[in-house]
Image (tube, rainbow, N blue to C red):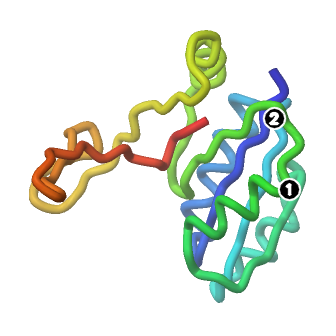
């Protein structure tokens, strides 16, 4: 598996650095694509100074969806993973990703982040839309 990891960022210099450190440690052979835009906190300079970033894409749109799409356009791997700034992959992340992709075309994993109201991203979030109960997918850890 040739893995590309797309990391969208917006004014997340410190959080992004932790994410890039974890990627360098746990998936050093992955192509890392950072999509920045439009940050004003020195993110661009920090990314350019790092050895572990293969592609830096600057975008004007502040939308995470636009950033992910731009990253996917620049990714060269046969598997493209999306990891949000501030998340740190673990040593078993790539192995679990590969195992999941043996039986599915898309995989997602847990994202451990505290949310408002005492919830965490480990709690299922659902809502009633058009009379149907819909469960939402956290898109911060998807391939």
Residue found at the far front of this picture: 130
Q: Mark 1, residues whose alpha carbon is within 10 Å: few (<14), some, or many (≥20)? A: some
Q: Residues under labels 2 and 1: Cα distance?
A: 14 Å
Q: Mark 2, residues whose alpha carbon is within 10 Å: few (<14), some, or many (≥20)? A: many
- The answer to whether residue 78 is left or right of residue 136 is right
- The answer to whether residue 65 is left or right of residue 47 is left
Q: Position of residue 64 (x, y in %)?
A: 56, 67
Above/below status of 30 relative to 14: above
Above/below status of 70 relative to 33: below
Q: Quadrant of residue 3?
A: top right
For residue 23, the mark is none
**Circle nearer the viewer, 2 or 1:** 1
Above/below status of 112 relative to 7: above
For residue 30, the mark is 2
Q: Classify the position of the C terminus by image quarter.
A: top right
Q: Quadrant of residue 62?
A: bottom right
Q: Residue drawn 59% across and 75% down?
A: 10
Q: Residue drawn 40% across and 40% down?
A: 111
Q: Position of residue 32 (x, y in %)?
A: 79, 47
Tag 1 secondary structure:
helix
- The answer to whether residue 108 is left or right of residue 17 is left
Q: Residue drawn 89% across and 51% down?
A: 54
Q: Quadrant of residue 60?
A: bottom right
Q: Residue drawn 15% across and 47% down?
A: 132
- Identify residue for label 1: 74
Q: Position of residue 107 (x, y in %)?
A: 53, 28
Above/below status of 70 relative to 101: below
Tag 2 secondary structure:
loop
Q: Classify the position of the N terminus by image quarter.
A: top right
Identify the mark nearer the N-term, 2 or 1. 2
Residue in the foreground of this view, choosing between 60 and 112 = 60
* Labels 2 & 1 near each other (Cβ < 8 A): no
């Amino acid at each position: 598996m040739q893995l590309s990891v797309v990391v969208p960022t917006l004014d997340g210099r410190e959080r992004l650095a932790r994410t890039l450190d974890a990627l360098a440690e746990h998936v050093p052979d992955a192509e890392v694509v950072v999509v920045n835009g439009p940050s004003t906190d020195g993110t661009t300079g920090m990314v350019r100074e790092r050895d572990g970033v293969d592609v830096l894409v600057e975008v004007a749109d502040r939308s995470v969806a636009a950033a992910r799409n731009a990253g996917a356009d620049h990714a060269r791997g046969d598997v493209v993973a999306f990891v949000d700034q501030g998340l740190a992959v673990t040593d078993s992340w790539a192995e679990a990703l590969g195992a999941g992709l043996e039986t599915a075309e898309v995989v997602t994993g847990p994202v451990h982040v505290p949310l408002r109201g005492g919830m965490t991203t480990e709690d299922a979030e659902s809502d009633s839309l058009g009379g149907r109960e819909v469960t939402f997918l956290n898109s911060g850890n998807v391939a």
